[in-house]
Image: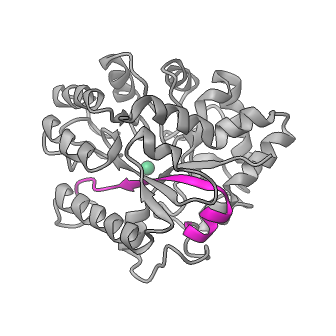
Amino acid sequence: MEWIVVDGHQDIAMALLEDEGWDFAAPASEAHALSLADAKSGRVVLIFGTVFATAGYWGDATPAESAERQMGCYEDLLARHAADLFRVESRGDLKLCQPGGPIGLLHLMEGADPIRSPRDLRRWARRGVRVVGPAWNTGNRYCGGWDDARSLTADGRRLIAEMREHRVLPDVSHLKPEAFDAVLACDDGLVVASHSNAHAVHRHRRNLTDDQIRAVGERDGLVGIVLYNPFLGEGDVTINTVLDHIEHMVGLVGAEHVGLGSDLDGGFTPAEAPRGIDSVGDLRLLGEGLAGRGLDGEAIGKILGGNWMRVLQRTLPE
Ligand SMILES: [Zn+2]
């Protein structure tokens, strides 16, 4: 069976800025698992390209300046690969995400630091940012990080309200438990965890507890499996380790609420991704692995791409 693949988390702009010699169109290499060529051959139809501009990460630049620079990277990329890549902002755009066609690029802001005020969210939404995580590991005016006392702030709650008004999805990956709960307490809308694994399979603080995974599922959202070995397991991390996380989540919430947010190239090389996955084109191998574990084709299709499509159909503007 031929599935489509949606990858809900890729730090493309960050990789472009950190390695100026990198060619996104070239086949995957030891340095980069991300590759337009491999995405095409691997039936990847949609990739979330992050704007990762948390305060302090990019030297003296303000988060808003860093975010502008990254949006500029995406503009260049879209212009350079106009036949192969297009920006996805609406439900109509989703229909164009088909194997053999151009690959969709949807913007996810990882850490809301560049958003100057809750009302400023609408400006980013107009520019195509359709998913926002209130905070990365470090906190900001909207949400505390892992190591500070604050949770979601009053401005954070206003930001979530603005996101709902402008059809932008909240991303609860990277939030500490108190902030995760606070985002869900804002309303009863759909939330996603774009790149998070199961804590019950591997005890890492970035991974979600069973209760958190259930909470995302109850909102009709999804959890995207992240393919960074420290979040997956210890020792020899393989495709099987990834399947363990997926299988655990499917057992908790069903195949409708699990997806992929690989983060391949998120500041790490293919050597730190599971053995057997060397490029974004290899994500489809997870489908074969899941079939080997007894999942049917329909469930596998949802996990590899169908669930992200459903969530976006429900969220994006017409
Ligand atoms: Zn991340």
Q: As drawn, which residue projects farthest toward the bottom?
A: 21
- Pick the residue in front: 158 or 153: 158
Residue range corresponding to the magenta coloring: 34-55
Residue 35 can be seen in this image: no
Percent from the top left, x then y, of residue 21? 43, 83
Compared to residue 210, the image places residue 192 above or below, namely: below
Residue 63, image x and y in percent?
20, 56
Tell me if residue 2 is in the magenta stretch. no
Q: How many marks?
A: 0
Q: Is residue 31 above or below residue 61?
A: below
The residue closer to the viewer here, 206 or 118, is 118
Residue 216, given in percent of the width and then of the height, sits at 50, 25
The quadrant holding residue 256 is: top right
Q: In the displayed structure, does residue 17 sit left or right of residue 263?
A: left
Q: Residue at x 50, y 32 (%)?
A: 311
Q: Quadrant of residue 42?
A: bottom right
Q: Residue at x 33, y 55 (%)?
A: 51
